[in-house]
Each structure stands twice: as structure tokens, then as C-alpha cells.
Amino acid sequence: MKKKEGEKMKKKLAFTVLGLCFILSSSAYAWVDAINPFPGGLNLGHIATPGDSVSYSANQLLIGRANTNVYVTVRRLPLRKGLNFLDTNYNITVYGAGQDSMGRIIPHNGKIYMNFSVTATSDFGDMAGEYTTVLPTVKITIRRGSQRDTAGFKIKCIVGSYIEAGPDRSFNLGSINKPGDTATFERYLLKIGKANVKVNVHIKTEALKREERDGNGHGIGSFDVLNTITRIWKGINRIEFHGDDERDIGSVHPLPGGGLFLTRLKINATSHPISWGSKGLSDDAGEYAGKIILTLSAL
Amino acid sequence: MKKIWMFGLVIMLIFLMIPTAYAFKVSPAKIEGVEIPKGKTGVGILYLTGSVINEEIKIFPTDIMVDRRGNLSFERLEQWGYSCFDWIKLPEEKILTLSKSRIKELEFKIKAPFNAKPGQYYGCIMVEPTEFTPIKREIEGVTTVLNLKSRIAVPIIIEVPGRIPKLKGKVISAEAKITPEEIRILSTFQNEGNIIEEVRGEAQIINKENKRVYDVVTLKALNPSAADGMGKVFPECLRDFEGVVKRPLPVGDYELRVSFDFGLGIRKARARADFSVTEEIAVSQKELLTLAVVSELLEFELKPGGMVMEGLEVINFDFQSLRVAISTFPEKVSWLQVTQTELNLRANGSRKIRFRIKIPWDWEEEKFIVERSAKIVLTPERGKQIVVDVVVKEEQGDEG
């Protein structure tokens, strides 16, 4: 009786071992292999002018091999530089034999494919420079039971720089009605343009002046010059220009959205106290004109 | 009634557009890293975009250089060996009409001559409106006009390959300018290399008798390129640097040791000079320089909503205790708070004042504003006021 029970136990044990061997051998034959279609990353190229976009499209990219059904997940990340994000649109389809979803894929002849397109669009608020997906985007995770493999690639593109120059014309102006008067031009938050790079501002000023004229109204080459002081505030620092003057005021960083601003500009133009006759407006009266030339450069 | 409203709205929109009516755009803002072997020709393209009106603009090549006082110069330089002015060939048409909102491509060529030495060469394409924009007002019969012109200089940096970039420089002059008010260190650096150098200067004040270092002065370039006083120096060009001695010097003979770091780390351009401090200067300095801080430039990198609590060490050089008033400039800065408004320092004592920076979630045009600056002003009851610059930049961190 004991002998029979022992034989039964032996048979059970043998079957268990055989079963285990079968399970182990069958799972050893299931394999997956994720393939990175762009081992060096994907360079989308150069967006010459903000407002433009750059794109890439490819079909039937081999992204993996497997001998069994697998699950594929894809991660889409926007292109970014610091806290600046480009508008990034992906269109991705993963497929094997017949299926075209991100879920369970049946490999076609052991291969898994991807149709892939990406478009990155920059607007005028984006700073110039290199934008990348910080982590490998389009991360392909193929898994089947305990078998798992991943591959991914980073995407990058360059956003070109631009400067837009345009004088802001909304000044408040004063006038000189008698000798010794001071006319004041003043503007807070003077917009000097737009840019997506740090911009050096060079300013050349000319005093307010008026060419003296002969009896026929023709200019005689000599000028009545007002004592002109131009004060410019960059942040909390004040820079003063006296009459005809020329200087750098340093670099101005664009604000979000690209605006280049000087905090304040104030021009005081004072007439000479003794040059006018006792009757008030005499020969020196007339139109006085001054000049400001702003040169913006990205050096 | 509806029509009148619509008309009013259109007039208002036109009025709002006036300030930008004379704006034109140039892209790219800078052309650099272009390699042109000698004898070869490179092609560059500038994209010029018109504004909301048709506008005439003038395009011409010129030189670009930073002069010794740190000002950018756009004048033609005849004798400069690193100018690529003559290499730039613009199209025949020098005056272009930019149509409204249209993009015009300006193709130009740069030919490096056969005899060009390897190195960096610099030039600039100037894009400027042909006319000034007049701002004209007439009040009580007197007319005043302010003529404005905004122009864009596109720097061009060409590299002629063939040699590893050479960093080299020397100190042209070093001197201490002594007045009863201050001892100012003036020094000039010359770039002897073949590329732009980013130069930082320092001066040690050493007593000749006891060989002790009495002060270390940061030499800042005039019109510096960075907040720490760094100055960019073009090849063959000079740049002036200066700094002020912050600690009172006793009577005696001193050695001034000036050194400039131009990018080679340990290898620096150095020079020495001697100066003496008389009793009159020593007394006046002792009266004026009662206070010092470590340091006069505080830079922080923060994210929107970020906060930092820091200490600023203040030292009293006076032989008596000193009361110091602490304020900020501008007076009301919401993001910078100093925990105390007054400080008492004992003779030759030092203390830390605490301040807090908290960047608010300032949201403008769909983005946060982080960059800002202010000053902490320390006014002692005797002697010179000290101003500390506080600069906050945006942290360029990665997210997982």
C-alpha cells in the first residue's frame, strides 16, 4: 500500500517538474526588443522667424521586434527651453499586423512599426535658442509578461532670433513760451521694440535746435540750440545725455511676449534766458527739433 | 447707433496701432559661428518683415566694435585687422521698400580673401529707416519736434578656420588715482588674441612693509557686459577697468597688483604699480570708509514663486560703534524685504543682516516675470553710504 502511494507521489512530482519545465521553456521563447529609430536623436531643424513652424514626418519606422503580442506606450513631450514651451503637435500611430492602436499590438512578421509626425511652432514670445524634449520623448515600452524593453529619442530644434524696432510715439510734450522756460518730453515705460534675444541699446541724442534764417527764410547754417538734457532709466539706473551725445545704455532683456522697454525717458529742453527780446517771443521763436537715434543689436 | 459705435471702435483701433506703425522686423538678429575658409564665399540671408505700412529702409555694411569705455561703435574702422567690412557684398539695391506685413529675403555674400589669417572677424549690417519719425506738437504757437529713428544692427561674426582660437592679453596700464574722497584703481587691458575675450579684473592692495593684503578690489569694466563687471574685449582692442578701495588704508607705501582673467583660468595678465598713502589721505579715508559689505553684488537664480532667505555681512572699520540705517531702492519693493531697518555695529565688529526674496506669480502675456533688480542701501551715521545690487534671474531648471 505504501509502495503504491510512493509511486503516485513520484508520478505527481514528475508531472509537476515537467509542467514547470514546459512553462519556463515556453516563456523563455517569448522575447521583445525595442528599437530606437533615431539613435542620435531627431533634429527638426531651424525655425528662421518666430511665427513659423518646423515639422518631420516618417512612415513605417521599425520600433521593435517581438514573437508575441505586446503592449506599446508612447510618451509625447513638448519642446522646451527653460520655462519656454513650443507648441508641439504629434501624430503617432503604432501598428503591427492589422492593429493600429497604442494598446495591444500583434507584431507583423515579428516587427512593430510606427507612423510618426511632429510639428513645432514658435510664436513671437519664444526666446531664441535650442529647444529640446528634456526626457526621451516617444518612449516605447514593449512588455509581455516579465519581458520588457524600452527605447526613445530626444527631439530638438533651433528657434532663430529677431529684433523688431519701432519708436513709441506717445510722448507728452511741453512748450517754451518765454526765455528760460523748460519744455519737457516725458514717457514712462517707453517701448523701443520687440525681440526674442537680449538686446544692446545704443543711443545717440541731438539737442533741440533751430536753424537761423535770413530775410528770405533761407537757413544760414548757424543754429539756436536749446540746453537739452535727456535722461533715460533702464531698470532703476538713470543715464544722462547732454545735448549732442552718444552712449550705450547696456543690455535690455525682452519681457515675456518679447517687449523691449526702457522704464522712463525724460527730455528737458531749456531756452537760453537772455537770447530772447524783452517782448517775449522774438527772433529765437520758432520750431525747434531734436533727434534720438536708437540702435538695437544682439551683440 | 450701432454704426456709430462700430466707427468709434475702428477709429480707436487705428489710434492704438499708431505707436507700432513704423516698426519693421529683422531675423536673425545675429549671424555667428559661420566658417568661411580663405578664398571661399559664404551666403547669408536676412529676413526683413514690413510693418503695417509701406516703409523705405536703407541697408549698408559697417563695422561693429566695443570701444575701451564699453560703448558699441558702428562707425567704419579703417585700420582694424579683424574687420570683415570689405568682405560683405550686399545686393546693388541699397534702399528697399518693405511692404506691409510682407517678408523680404535679403541675400548677401561674404568672401574671405586668400590672405586672411585664421581667426574671428567682425562686421555688421545696418538696417535703418530712411526717414525719421517726427513727434510734433504745437502749443500756443511754439512748435517742438522730436525726431526718432530706431535702427537694427545685425552683428556678423565670421570664423576663418585653420588655427585653434588664441586667448592672449596684457595689462597696458595700472595706477591708483588718489583723492581725499577715494582711492580709485584704474587699469587697461589689451586683447592680443584672435577672438573676443571675456575679461574679469581684480586688484590686490599690499602693504610694502608688512606684506599684508589690505584689500582686494574687483575691477569692473566701464559699461560692463555682465553684472559682475565682466567686459568683452575685441581682438587688438583695449578696455578700461576700474574699482574703488573699500577699506581704509593706514599711512604707508603700497603695491598694487592687478590681474585679469581672460579665459585661461590660472594664466592671467598681471601688472604691478606702487602708490603711497599720506596722513591726510589716511585720515580722510578713515572718516569716509567706515563700512564694508561682503559682497556688493548679490545674484540669485529663482523660479516663479521661488523664495530665498539670505544674510549680508556688514563690517564696521571705525574705532567707535556705528549706527547704520538700512533701506531699499526703490523704497517699496514687494519682492525684497530686509528684516531690519537699523543696525548697531560695535568698533571693528561685523554682523549679518537678513533679507528675504520672494518672487510673486506675476503673470503677463501668458508667462511669468522673474527677472528683476533692486538695491539695498546702507547709510552709516558717519562715512560713505554703501549700495548693494540685488539681481534675480530666471532659473533655467529641467523638469523630469
Image: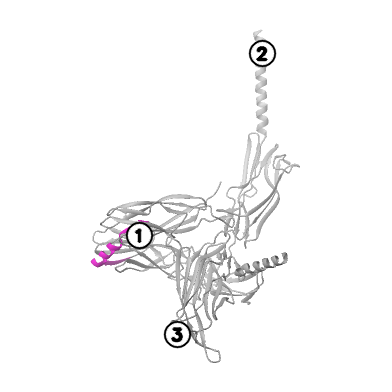
Residue found at the very far bottom of the displayed protein: A215
Judged left or right of residue A21, residue B337 is left
Could you tell me the amino acid type at mark 1?
Thr
Which label is found at residue A7? Answer: 2
Front one among B369 and B83: B369
Judged left or right of residue B221, residue A141 is right
Residue highlighted by disc 3:
A275
- Count of picture labels: 3
Q: Say if A160 sits above or below B112 in the image.
A: above
Residue highlighted by disc 1:
B379
Which label is found at residue B303? Answer: none
Tell whether position A72 is magenta: no
Could you tell me the amino acid type at mark 2?
Glu
Q: Say if B47 sits above or below A208 in the image.
A: above
Q: Secondary structure at mark 2?
A: helix
Q: Position of residue A48 (x, y in %)?
A: 62, 62
Q: Secondary structure at mark 3?
A: loop
Could you tell me the amino acid type at mark 3?
Ser
Q: Which residues are magenta?
A: B272-294
Callout 1: chain = B
| Mark 3 touches mark 1? (CB < 8 Å) | no
- The residue sitting at 28% across, 67% down in the picture is B275
Q: Position of residue B86 (x, y in %)?
A: 54, 75
Front one among B357 and B196: B357
Query: Upstream in the sequence, badge 3 or badge 2?
Result: 2
Q: Disc 3 or disc 1, which is closer to the eye?
A: 3
Q: Position of residue B195 (x, y in %)?
A: 48, 65
Callout 3: chain = A
- The residue sitting at 27% across, 65% down in the picture is B284
